[in-house]
Image: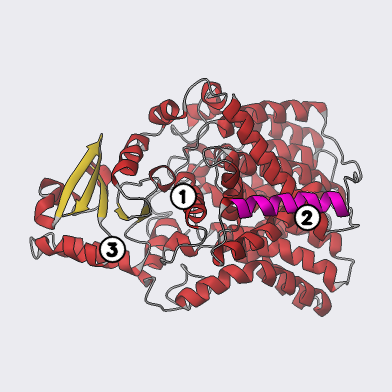
């Protein structure tokens, strides 16, 4: 129970610091609290970036910034209460409350998300240990990490807490609250925003993401805040006011690299409308937030959007093979895409490959019929713009921003009774016990982990029971020096292992090591493989036994690792750890 309370306190401190920062940069403006929280996140993420870039990013520095934000707000502005927001109808509150309790239990349980225990939390932990960004160039290392800096802030308060997941969970609360303000701003039917909130919250992919230290719900919130600010500021011609919208749009990019679509789309609209003063203010705000990450990528690799678009911005650190590999795995019309399975069928009913949205996703595009209504047109257009992001990655999580706006448009054009019916059906069909009947296992939240959430079950016991690779991560932590580089073919979680993991597709260097292993399959120069790895300062390799290894040379390697210049350090279950001899 004490661990749960400290995690909640840490998350509340982070959210309070973000909100207070947002209040400081928006004096005298009656923005809803979610808008201020996101603007504060954007500003704090920039401050944390420069702390890390200057080598001062240790926990005390993060905490000092947070204290200064809250103290500055209290001293300069004070706790003035803004206009009261519209409340939800009681039935909606009941449905949202049930899901909130379920999600809260999972958010308080130890982190098990694959990407969360990988780079989302692994990199911030490394930053805090070393006081700055790593010197190496890697795929995840050069992605914009705006939300990860906020997670680093949470971890600086308590490194063993689930505060980052709770901060992300708070973004879901903020999204729901802001939907009401958007509905009021556009004068939508009174049922549109509440019904949309239930449908979105109930979505299985939302539950899985919101309860982990992912960034998908934070990205949804950032897009919704940007949308609200554009609506609110549209009659305003002040460049200073539009700079706030630019800050939110720039934060979309710093949370997820494909979020660059958001500021780009708004810039195009302002150009078409010939609103040049507003464009100048907007561009300045977006540049302030996005430029640090773009500049870091540019000066490191001469590619401002590294690690992507390497076929356009040729460099020696990232191979065009990475672009091809990711296109083959994720892109909408890739050879491995619609030819092998139906995208819509998977995200609506199965979720085994892409994640589950639920059957409501079939009806969501009908919201585009609202293009003829003035109040719905901007929502439908926003959904179409954000769908561009999904065409680059088929994972259901990347559809969530477009899905939210599509559902809002749908609820705004259908009659009240039909909207209520769709909401109830979606809430029931998305409940984990029901979703498991028609979908694959593991695509929705499983059970009520109240014992782990409340400290009645230890973290180690819970993780060993629910995360098969966790025991291997414990083993790796004991046998791999901290921050040592690992050629990872097993999905080793860096957050729990403390290792620096890189996979074969992530950099040109990793591709070259992968080709070395492939070339050694016909038993040519196998004894020099270990030496070549050592020359790249990569001294460890992980594999998963059996078909899960996923690499063609794994079976031969595991039979005689010594012939390849490696030795077996140890194994845990199906996982193997090797070191250069």
Q: Position of residue 440 (x, y in %)?
A: 44, 34
Q: Is residue 50 left or right of residue 471?
A: right
User: What are the residue bounds of the magenta stretch?
Assistant: 60-76
Q: What residue is pinned by disc 2?
A: 22
Q: Nearer the viewer, residue 152 or 38?
A: 152
Q: Secondary structure at mark 2?
A: helix
Would you place residue 254 above or below residue 350 in this image? below
Of tags 3 and 2, the one toward the viewer is 3
Sequence-first disc among 3 and 1:
1
Q: Secondary structure at mark 1?
A: helix
Q: Position of residue 50 (x, y in %)?
A: 61, 65
- Report the magenta stretch's main SS: helix
Q: Quadrant of the N terminus?
A: top right
Q: Could you tell me how far apart the alpha carbons at marks 3 and 1 are, in whole angstroms? A: 20 Å
Residue 424, quarter of the rendered image: top right
Sequence-first disc among 2 and 1:
2
Q: Is residue 204 visible?
A: yes
Disc 2 crowd rating (10 Å Cα; few below 14, some 14-19, many 20+) is many
Residue 122 badge: 1
Residue, x 74% and y 67% (percent of image)?
Answer: 246
Residue, x 76% and y 54% (percent of image)?
Answer: 21
* Residue 5 lies within the magenta run: no
In contact (CB < 8 Å): disc 3 and disc 1:
no
Q: Is residue 382 left or right of residue 54?
A: right
Q: What residue is pinned by disc 3?
A: 537
Would you place residue 464 above or below residue 291 in this image? above
């Amino acid at each position: 129970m004490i661990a749960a309370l400290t995690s909640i306190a840490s998350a509340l401190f982070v959210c309070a610091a973000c909100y207070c920062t947002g209040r400081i940069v928006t004096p005298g403006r009656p923005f809803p609290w979610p808008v201020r929280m996101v603007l504060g996140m954007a500003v704090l993420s920039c401050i944390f970036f420069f702390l890390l870039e200057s080598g001062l990013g240790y926990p005390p520095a993060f905490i000092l910034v947070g204290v200064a934000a809250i103290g500055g707000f209290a001293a300069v502005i004070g706790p003035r209460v803004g206009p009261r927001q519209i409340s939800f109808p009681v039935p909606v509150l009941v449905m949202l409350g049930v899901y909130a309790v379920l999600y809260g239990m999972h958010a308080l349980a130890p982190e098990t998300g694959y990407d969360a225990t990988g780079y989302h939390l692994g990199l911030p932990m490394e930053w805090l240990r070393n006081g700055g960004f790593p010197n190496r160039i890697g795929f995840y290392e050069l992605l914009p990490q705006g939300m990860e800096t906020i997670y680093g802030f949470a971890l600086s308060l308590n490194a063993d807490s689930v505060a980052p997941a709770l901060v992300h969970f708070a973004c879901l609360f903020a999204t729901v609250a802001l939907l009401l303000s958007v509905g009021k701003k556009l004068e939508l039917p009174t049922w549109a925003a509440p019904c949309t909130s239930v449908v979105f919250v109930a979505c299985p992919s939302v539950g899985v993401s919101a309860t982990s230290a992912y960034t998908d719900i934070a990205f949804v919130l950032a897009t919704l805040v940007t949308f609200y600010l554009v609506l609110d500021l549209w009659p305003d011609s002040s460049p200073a006011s539009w700079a706030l919208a630019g800050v939110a749009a720039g934060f979309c990019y710093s949370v997820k690299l494909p979020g660059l679509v958001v500021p780009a789309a708004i810039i195009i609209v302002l150009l078409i409308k010939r609103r040049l003063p507003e464009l100048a203010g907007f561009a300045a705000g977006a540049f302030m937030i996005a430029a640090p990450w773009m500049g870091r990528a540019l000066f490191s690799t001469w590619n401002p959007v590294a690690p992507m678009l390497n076929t356009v911005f040729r460099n020696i650190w990232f191979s065009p093979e990475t672009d091809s590999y990711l296109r083959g795995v994720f892109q909408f019309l890739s050879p491995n895409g619609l030819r092998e399975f139906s995208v819509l069928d998977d995200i609506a009913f199965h979720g085994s490959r892409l994640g589950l949205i639920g059957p409501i996703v079939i009806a969501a595009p009908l919201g585009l019929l609202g293009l003829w209504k003035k109040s719905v047109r901007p929502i439908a257009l926003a959904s179409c713009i954000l769908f561009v992001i999904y065409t680059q990655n088929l994972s259901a999580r990347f559809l969530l921003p477009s899905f939210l706006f599509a559902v809002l448009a749908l609820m705004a054009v259908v009659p009240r009774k039909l909207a209520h019916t769709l909401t109830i059906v979606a809430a029931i069909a998305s409940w984990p016990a029901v979703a498991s009947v028609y979908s694959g296992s593991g695509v929705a939240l499983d059970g009520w982990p109240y014992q782990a959430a409340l400290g009645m079950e230890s973290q180690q016991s819970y993780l060993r029971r629910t995360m098969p690779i966790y025991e291997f991560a414990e083993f790796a932590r004991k046998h791999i020096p901290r921050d040592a580089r690992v050629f990872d073919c097993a999905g080793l979680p860096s957050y729990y292992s403390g290792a620096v993991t890189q996979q074969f597709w992530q950099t040109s260097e990793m591709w070259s090591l992968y080709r070395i292993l492939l070339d050694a399959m016909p038993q040519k120069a196998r004894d020099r493989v270990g030496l070549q790895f050592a020359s790249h300062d990569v001294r460890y390799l992980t594999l998963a036994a059996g078909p899960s290894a996923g690499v063609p040379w794994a079976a031969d390697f595991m039979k005689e690792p010594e012939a390849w210049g490696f030795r077996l350090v140890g194994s845990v279950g199906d996982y193997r750890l090797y070191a250069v001899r």
